Amino acid sequence: MLRRLPHPHVPAEYSPGGRLRVAELQRFLVLLHNALAQLRPIPPVTLYVLDEHDWRRFTRLPYGYPFQRSKPGEGHGVFAPLRYPDRLLERLTRVFAEAARRGGRLPGPLVVFLDLMIAHEYAHAVAVAWGLRARVRWVDEFLANYLYLLALYRSDRDLYGQARAWAKLASRLEPERRSLSGFERYPRRPLAEQLWFQGVFTLEAARMIEESGDRFVRRLLATAPLSRRDLHRKLLAAEPGLKAFFRTFGEKVT
C-alpha cells in the first residue's frame, strides 16, 4: 500500500521506507514548479517514489530510470526509484569514466545526476500540459532539457551549474550516429549515445537561457500547441540560433 504526502502542486505517493526521500524530491520539484509557473499555470504533477516491487505495478521499464506518464483523464505523473540499483550506477560509472578519459571529470556523485533526470521528467510533464509536446522525439527531449534548466537557472544556480557540467562531460562521448532523424528512428540507442544527445541538447539549452532567458519558451507558448506541421519553422522563429545547432548533427533546416 502506497503512502501519500499531499501538496497542491506536487502531491506524492511512495513505497514504505521512502518518507525522507519523497519529501526531499517533493521539495525539489516544488522549486521547479514555482519557477516555471511564472510563465503559465501548471496542473498538479504527482510524484511516485517506488521500490522495485511497486515499480512493477506501474511499468515494465527497467527499475531505476526515472520516467513520466501523462494521459488524458489520468493526469500527470513522474516516477522515481526509492533507491538507484547498483547495476544502473555501475553502467553509468563505466560510460562517464570513458567520457572523463576524453578530457572531462565527474562533476559529483552519480545520484545527483540521476536526481536531475527526475527534474527532466517533470519538465516533460509540464511541456505536455502546456501544449508543447511535438511528438517528435528529439524536439520533446530538447524542450524538456530547456524547461528544467530554465527552472534551475531561476531557482538554484548551483544545481544549474552541476547540470551544465554533467552535460559537458556527456558531450565528450563519441556516438556512432549523430543525426536527429536517426534519433527518431533508433530510440533504443546505446547508453553512451543517449547521454551524448542529452548532453548536447542541454548545452544548447543553457546557451539560449544564458543569452536570452525565457524568450524561447515564451515565443513557443504564443504558438502552442505544437505539432509536426511547420514545427521547424516555429522552432527557428522562436530561436534563430538553432540553425547553427542543427549543423552539429549534419542537418539542413530552412
Image: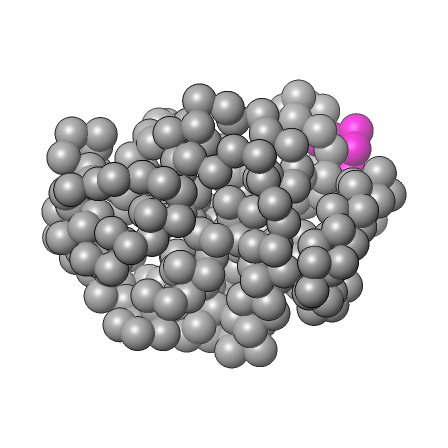
Q: Residue at x 14, y 53 (%)?
A: 237
The magenta span reads: 51-55
Based on the picture, tell me whether residue 134 belongs to the magenta stretch: no
Residue 246 is situated, as x and y percent measured from the top left of the image, at 32, 47
163 relative position to 232: left or right: right
Q: Residue furthest bottom?
A: 157
Q: Residue at x 52, y 26 (%)?
A: 187
Most common secondary structure along the magenta stretch: helix
Front residue (pair 189, 76): 189
Quarter location, residue 188: top right
Q: Quadrant of the C terminus?
A: top left
Question: In the rendered image, which quarter is residue 116 located in?
Answer: bottom right
Query: Measured from the top left, where is residue 152 in percent x and y?
Result: 48, 68
User: In the drawing, does residue 16 fall left or right of residue 146?
Assistant: right
Residue at left offset 70%, top offset 58%: 102
Q: How is the image coloured?
A: one colour
Which corner quadrant holds the N terminus? top right
- The answer to whether residue 7 is visible is no
Name the one closer to the observer, 110 or 37.
Answer: 110
Where is residue 177 shown, x and y percent of the image?
52, 33
Instruction: From the viewer's perspective, tell me whether residue 221 is left or right of residue 42.
Output: left
Q: Is residue 54 magenta?
A: yes
26 on left or right of 126: right
Indicate the quadrant where residue 169 lies. bottom right
Q: Residue at x 61, y 55 (%)?
A: 172
